[in-house]
């Protein structure tokens, strides 16, 4: 019997599971070529523009470098007090002679891992990245392999890293979508290390440098994460800001100057903070639809949410909201209760804004011989039609 991908419509209203018209706020424009703004609590996409296009990461690749370091620290493979030597390669490629962003680590010195983390995050230090890469993996090439393995494990399917710094290299590409996903992961998974992103300054080798993230000084609740620039893709940024319990994540690229980058970031963050409200669409464990069952005592099983389904919606001028459940079916009896069998997808207008798993709300036992024969006959007569829906 073929397995068919089914879609069941769900009509979402603001007064319960009833048909209703829900809408989108006055659209906002940005000079960025790529942009993505997400509400962290609900995962709602508030604004998107070419967010899946692949671009050179520049220093935003350092987010992946830090994730690998934080993961090793969390697993006990590394300690903050461990020291690594500054090789000539690290010094020449990312240190004082390189003319790039650096923490000015002296050749053959041995900074602690915590010092290197602060150099990378606060000063965007290329020498700090290379020292960590060589110390942890033996070479930057080996460390880049580890970055890519870790990226795939986190679900970053398209981003490819060639070095630890983000310095221009053939084949090194990321998307704003995956960088924002990575930033959300870092914030959620490593609160003990995320604090470094909000640190205002760091002094190393008697050289004082302020945090390169301009949003920290704009009084908009920003507390991370990083900036980047390449001639090919322009000025970029991945940021997070929290105000009155609401946290937003923003990714931007393709801007003409650092001033324009700061202006556009501030505009989008303030727009996101001021023009949306939290709306509960489905309570926790709410029944939202049903799935067909083959060979069961009943021909369908109810489907429920797990956690509550919430969206951050515009306060006014909203576009229609619609939701559908997708599953591979019909499900084969017996069906267990509480098993994830599909996904609830929610669109605002033409934009997919949220996906949530759905679970069976009840068990369905196998049916008798007569019921199985009926389902088999039904499958023979209609299955070929369903395949082409």
Image: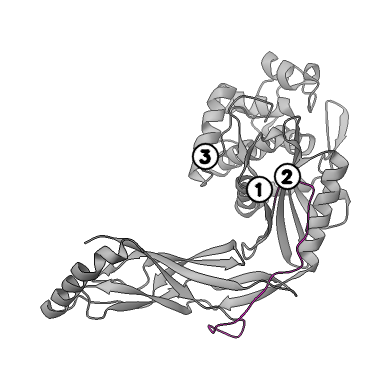
Query: Dot 2 corresponds to which residue?
Result: 33
Q: Position of residue 279 (x, y in %)?
A: 65, 76
Residue at the location (88% across, 52% down)?
A: 218
Residue at the location (53% across, 25% down)?
A: 142
Q: Quadrant of the N terminus?
A: bottom left
Query: Dot 3 corresponds to which residue?
Result: 150
Q: Are marks 1 and 3 in contact (CB under 8 Å)?
A: no
| Majority SS type along the magenta span | loop
Q: Position of residue 244 (x, y in %)?
A: 78, 68
Q: Is residue 170 left or right of residue 10?
A: right
**CA–CA distance between discs 1 and 3?**
25 Å
Secondary structure under tag 2 reads loop
| Residue 41 or residue 125, whichever sits in front | 41
Question: Which of pointers 1 and 3 lies earlier in the amino acid sequence?
Answer: 1
Q: Which range of residues does the magenta coloring cover? A: 14-35
Q: Is residue 257 left or right of residue 371?
A: right
Q: Position of residue 140 (x, y in %)?
A: 59, 23
In this picture, is 363 found above or below 330? below
């Amino acid at each position: 019997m073929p397995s068919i991908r089914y879609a069941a419509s769900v009509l979402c209203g603001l007064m319960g599971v009833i048909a209703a018209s829900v809408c989108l706020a006055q659209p906002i424009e940005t000079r960025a070529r790529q942009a993505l703004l997400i509400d962290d609590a609900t995962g709602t996409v508030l604004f998107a523009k070419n967010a899946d296009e692949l671009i050179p990461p520049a220093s935003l690749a350092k987010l992946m470098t830090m994730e690998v370091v934080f993961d090793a620290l969390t697993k006990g493979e590394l300690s903050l007090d461990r020291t690594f030597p500054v090789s000539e390669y690290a010094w020449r490629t990312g240190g004082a002679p390189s003319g790039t962003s650096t923490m000015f680590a002296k050749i053959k010195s041995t900074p602690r891992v915590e010092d290197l983390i602060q150099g990378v995050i606060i000063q965007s230090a290329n020498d700090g990245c290379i020292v960590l890469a060589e110390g942890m993996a033996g070479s930057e090439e080996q460390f880049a392999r580890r970055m890519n393995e870790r990226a795939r494990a986190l679900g970053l399917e398209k981003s490819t890293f060639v070095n630890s710094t983000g310095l221009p290299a053939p084949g090194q590409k990321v998307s704003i979508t995956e960088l924002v996903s990575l930033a959300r992961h870092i914030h959620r998974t490593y609160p003990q290390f995320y604090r470094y992103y909000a640190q205002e300054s760091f002094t190393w080798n008697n050289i004082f440098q302020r945090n390169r993230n301009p949003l920290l000084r704009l009084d908009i609740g920003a507390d991370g994460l990083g900036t980047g620039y390449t001639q090919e893709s322009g000025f970029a940024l991945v940021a997070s800001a929290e105000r009155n319990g609401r946290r937003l994540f923003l990714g931007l690229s393709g801007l003409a100057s650092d001033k324009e980058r700061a202006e556009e970031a501030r505009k989008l963050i303030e727009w996101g903070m001021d023009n949306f409200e939290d709306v509960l669409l489905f309570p926790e464990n709410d029944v939202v639809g049903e799935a067909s069952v083959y060979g069961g005592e009943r021909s369908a099983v109810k489907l429920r949410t797990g956690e509550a389904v919430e969206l951050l919606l515009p306060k006014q001028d909203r576009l229609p909201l619609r939701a559908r459940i997708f599953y591979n079916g019909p499900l084969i009896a017996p069906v267990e209760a509480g098993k994830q069998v599909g996904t609830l997808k929610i669109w605002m207008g033409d934009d997919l804004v949220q996906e949530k798993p759905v679970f069976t709300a009840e068990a369905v036992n196998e049916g008798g011989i007569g019921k199985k024969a009926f389902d088999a006959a039904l499958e023979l007569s209609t299955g070929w039609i369903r395949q082409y829906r």
